[in-house]
Image: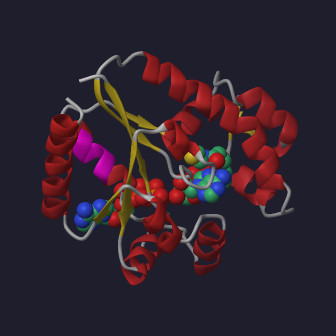
């Protein structure tokens, strides 16, 4: 089977990381965009200098402090697009370097902003993880330090779930681990048979 790129996405708290781990447990290589950003922000990361130039207050212990960055983003509507303009090309380079290492079989790309940034055009198929809004809200608000305002702000920055459902080639509701694991296993089998 030649390389098959599966874009995994979903709004905050919908189950991307958990579902990505289910693919990894089946032996599927997974690239995680949020993890790539953490690497870029860590001391020695490629993102430290450019982000610190943009937001000097975020430079802390030779790395980028996300809390300071989050506070800076709240100061102006232009802040996040300016940050993305610096970070996203570095994330894309990390993604392409990962993809180049895998020559065949299914590869999963866990990308929160897959649809928001049109990255689905670089994928062979897309899987949306989703859940009822009330469950999403309960999950996110149960996180330490998360507030209603923060949740609303993050949701406002992400494409509505209904729009993502209309664009995804595959959709799974993350209601139980067993049910999602069964879905992941069936999807892997289907993709291997359909694209052998
Ligand atoms: C804005 C930042 C500082 C907030 O960091 P913090 O640790 O508080 O939140 P975290 O990173 O866990 O993100 C919380 C939620 O927002 C999502 N998110 C992250 N960046 C963005 C963004 N630019 N637009 C919309 N949602 C985003 C995440 O996927 C997650 O669902 C951080 O997310 C960041 O640096 N984002 C810019 C880089 C980026 O766009 N990352 C997404 C790559 S697809
Ligand atoms: N299939 C599932 N069944 C039951 N609970 C799930 C499932 N998938 C995820 N969850 C729960 O939902 C919460 C959010 O999951 P996860 O962190 O994977 O979401 P995410 O989309 O990666 O979130 P973020 O966008 O904030 O990174 C976690 O508490 C997790 O235990």
| Residue closest to the eye, 194 or 102 | 194
Residue 138 drawn at (x, y percent)? 40, 79
Q: In this view, does 122 lie to the left or right of 74?
A: left
| Residue closest to the eye, 88 or 71 | 88
Is residue 103 placed above or below 72 in the rendered structure? Answer: above
Residue 140 drawn at (x, y percent)? 45, 70
Residue at x 85% of width, y 40% of height: 54
How would you classify the magenta stretch by its main secondary structure?
helix
Q: In which quarter of the image is residue 194?
A: top left
Q: In this view, does 155 lie to the left or right of 25?
A: right
Is residue 161 placed above or below 79 in the rendered structure? Answer: below
Q: In this view, does 190 lie to the left or right of 171?
A: left
Residue 58 visible in the snapshot: no
Q: Residue furthest bottom?
A: 134
Quadrant holding the C terminus: top left
Residue at x 82% of width, y 46% of height: 82
In the rendered image, residue 66 lying in the magenta stretch gets the answer no
Q: Give the range drawn in magenta.
A: 19-23
| Residue closest to the eye, 136 or 116 | 116
Q: Quadrant of residue 188?
A: top left
Q: Colour scheme used in the picture? A: secondary structure
Residue 29 visible in the snapshot: yes
Residue at x 19% of width, y 67% of height: 176
Question: Looking at the image, how many numbered discs can be counted on the residues?
Answer: 0
Q: In which quarter of the image is residue 103?
A: top left
Quadrant holding the N terminus: top left
Residue at x 83% of width, y 54% of height: 79
Residue 3 drawn at (x, y percent)? 33, 25
| Residue closest to the eye, 10 or 55 | 10
């Amino acid at each position: 089977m030649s390389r098959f790129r599966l874009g995994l996405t979903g709004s905050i708290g919908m189950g991307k990381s958990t579902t990505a781990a289910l693919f990894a447990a089946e032996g599927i290589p997974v690239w995680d965009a949020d993890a790539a950003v953490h690497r870029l922000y860590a001391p020695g990361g490629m993102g430290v200098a450019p982000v610190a130039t943009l937001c000097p207050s975020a430079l802390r212990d030779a790395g980028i402090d996300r809390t300071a960055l989050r506070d800076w983003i709240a100061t102006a509507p232009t802040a996040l697009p300016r940050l993305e303009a610096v970070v996203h090309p570095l994330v894309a380079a990390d993604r392409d370097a990962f993809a180049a290492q895998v020559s065949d079989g299914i590869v999963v790309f866990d990308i929160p902003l897959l649809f928001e940034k049109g990255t689905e055009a670089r994928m062979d198929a897309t899987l949306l993880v989703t859940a009822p809004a009330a469950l999403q809200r309960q999950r996110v608000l149960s996180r330490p330090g998360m507030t209603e305002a923060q949740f609303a702000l993050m949701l406002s920055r992400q494409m509505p779930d209904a729009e993502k459902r209309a664009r995804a080639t595959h959709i799974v509701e993350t209601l139980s681990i067993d049910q999602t694991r069964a879905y992941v296993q069936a999807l892997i089998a289907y993709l291997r048979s359909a694209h052998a």
